[in-house]
Image (tube, helix red, strand yellow):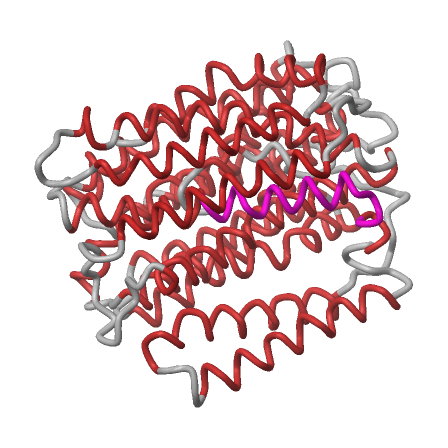
Amino acid sequence: MSSTPDSPDLRTGTASGRWVLTAAVLGSGVAFLDGTVVNAALPAIAEDLDADLAGLQWVLTGYLLTLGSLLVIGGSLGDLFGRRRMFVLGLLGFALASLACGVAPSTGTLIGARLVQGVAAAFLVPGSLAMISGSFHPEDRPKAIGAWSGLSGISLAVGPFLGGWLIDDVSWRAIFLINLPIVATAVYLTQRHVPETFDHDADRHVDVVGGALLAGGLAGVVYALIEGPVEGWSGSPLVIGTLGVASLLAFVVWEARSAHPMVPLSVFRSRQFSGANAATLGVYAALSGAMFLVVVFLQTEQGYSALEAGAAFLPITVFMMLFSQRAGAMAQQMGPRLPMTLGPLVAGAGIALFTLSNADVSYWEGVLPGAIVLGIGLTITVAPLTAAVLAAIDDRHAGIGSAINNAVARIAGLLAVAVLPALAGIAGANGGLDLSDGFDRAMYIAGGLCALGGVIAWLTIRTVAPMHSVMRADVSAPCADPSLVGADR
């Protein structure tokens, strides 16, 4: 069975169409599932592997580092060599890395396996939507993507309960090992039912040098941010951090001069595109940094079980699932500027409200208010943000534009998990997990950073923007990735 982007013919109401959707949802679901439960497993990992705060940071950032750095390249390889082929390779790599995570005897081994998971996800995540793009008839494509988004949202809702149960009643290792049967099913369905598709107009050159410079630069900077507060800012953190900054500068120079850049810098000439991505950086850095600390705080300081901590933020997922489509429709009518300004301000207030949580108050008084306000703020923000990114660039750059925006969100989370504990004074010299001092400060910093995203949007986003069809553009790259609102991005 084969098809090409020039002749997509599957229909959503047919058995063939349902099989393709099932394979895509199962494949992306393993990445989304890990994205919602890894934070809840951190205290158990710390106890079992004797991991300090820096080690736990690397468990999260290792995945984000390779995923954020290689996401655009992963999508390009799928266009060139086949979306189904790269999707299956991503699935197999993710399964092997998940097995390595599940049996890891030490923190270092777990971090290494998470790095490999991120590489695999860089093939898997863009491939999920690209297969739908290349397989479904244009008339059915928006409906297929809507079904993919809705079904993927269910994995976000189920993830905290399933993951929390596994962590409490089985082991933290089970949250990785459960990926294996899911991946096996997805590989079988993909090989049997999904047509192979290519982009025959895609650039035949893959910017491997650019990807290596970006990954190396981020790794150096993140190493310095995580290890500097523990080891001191002299010695290896200073040297490796400096090399990281030099690599990032070299990345910019290379992309500016390359005939086939991974990230065409010309797209940043648009004030709105640059502004929308700067707002993305602020919002998702705040979200990722706050969720990293809140879930650990609830378990280590408040006595929550992994299941209770994972489920504490279910209101956020519920708001996103029920009202995101309505928020997107409103943004199409009024333009993205107002919701992109108000949404981050509301979300920032929600993050700050997590400071209400302490041993003297219940979940309903300490956590729920922040979760509700944060859920409302993200619901207002996410769909208009996607629309603003896509409206700021030419149609021919829609795919790369949404891929860049997704990568920015991942890198924002990477940097926030690395730097927020140090800014809040949590990362002490002993590298311990005591969050009693500095937690409130971290929430105020994260809340302010999120609100800053709203200020940036007000200054850079047009009041009324011509809206591209979000559903049309999303098929080229995973800007609509539901895992962007999860804890582990």
Of the pair 231 and 170, the residue shown nearer to us: 231
- Residue lying furthest top in this view? 13
Outermost residue to the left:
360
Write the start and end of the magenta stretch as one range.
268-286
Which quadrant of the view contains residue 326?
top right
Decide which of 285, 27 is in the foreground and name it: 285
The image quarter in which residue 333 lies: top right
Q: Is residue 375 magenta?
A: no
Front residue of 255 and 444:
444
Q: Residue at x 62, y 18 (%)?
A: 328
Residue 477 placed where, x, y %?
69, 39
Give the vertical position of 422 relative to 350 (above or below).
below
Q: Residue at x 77, y 19 (%)?
A: 137
Q: Position of residue 376 (x, y in %)?
A: 44, 22
Indicate whether residue 282 is drawn in magenta: yes
Q: Residue at x 55, y 32 (%)?
A: 189
- Residue 100 at least partly seen: no
Q: Is residue 41 left or right of residue 9?
A: left
Quadrant of the frame with the N terminus: top right
**Where does residue 163 sit, x and y in percent of width and height?**
28, 39
Q: Taken as a whole, is the magenta stretch helix, strand or loop?
A: helix
Along the horizontal axis of the image, is 113 left or right of 65?
left
